[in-house]
Image (cartoon, rainbow, N blue to C red):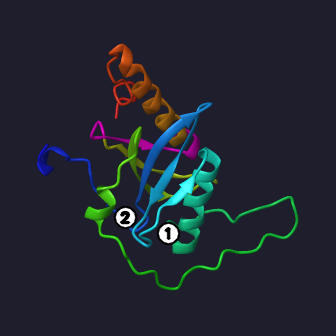
Amino acid sequence: MSSNEHTQWYIGAPNGVVLCINAVSGGEPSGELYHSYSPDPVRFENFEQMTLRMEHLYDELRFPHPSNNSRTFAGEMMPVQPTLERKKIMSDESLLSRHGEIGTFIVRVQHRQNSSWQGRITWMEQDKTVSFRSVWEMIKLIESAMDTVSDQEDEAEPTWFESRGD
């Protein structure tokens, strides 16, 4: 494919993340995520680790700024110390060259409102982008894509984006 065919492949924000899914076990993905501020992958073993590690990055960057303060019922919560100035280490081209064994997604969180995330996710293998209104909805989109990948052995058509109407 020429680069012109990848119309949805862009980072587009300082907090853009490339999410690489390498395995799925018991419905939980494992893999790594990449961002512009480190050449090293951030590994995760399930959706909870993935979202907590992404949230930590957004807190450090202070972007997007959360509309709610963090709460805890387990005692005093230590505030995240934001990095005053993070320098980009990886170019967008380098980030976009990362791929998971099962699937690859570009996640662009635009807002953190109502104690959740809103943004856009691109499934790189399908070159399709969908908006999401919550972390839960983003996770469901990733699960649906991974189900589609596993169903391809049965030659099922990808339906991830067709059902959304975006």
Per the rendering, the mark at residue 166 is none
**In this rendering, position of residue 76 left or right of residue 40:** right
Q: Is residue 14 left or right of residue 4?
A: right
- Residue position for label 1: 63
Q: Residue at x 51, y 73 (%)?
A: 61
Q: Quadrant of the N terminus?
A: top left
Identify the magenta region: 125-137
Residue at figure coordinates x 40%, y 46% from the top left: 100
Q: In the displayed structure, does residue 71 sit left or right of residue 29?
A: right
Amino acid type shown at disc 1: Phe
> Mark 2 belongs to which amino acid?
Ala
Q: Residue furthest bottom?
A: 84
Q: Nearer the viewer, residue 95 or 71?
A: 95
Q: Are marks 1 and 2 in contact (CB under 8 Å)?
A: yes
Q: Is residue 131 magenta?
A: yes
Q: Where's residue 127, x and y in %?
A: 27, 40
Q: Is residue 91 above or below residue 96?
A: below
Q: Residue furthest right?
A: 75
Q: Residue at x 41, y 20 (%)?
A: 151
Q: Helix, strand, or loop for circle 1?
A: loop
Q: Position of residue 32 (x, y in %)?
A: 49, 53
Q: Quadrant of the C terminus?
A: top left
Q: Is residue 98 magenta?
A: no
Which residue carries the number 2 mark?
A: 13
Could you tell me how far apart the alpha carbons at marks 1 and 2 are, in whole angstroms?
Answer: 9 Å
The answer to which of marks 1 and 2 sits earlier in the sequence is 2
| Residue 31, horizontal then vertical, whole percent | 50, 48
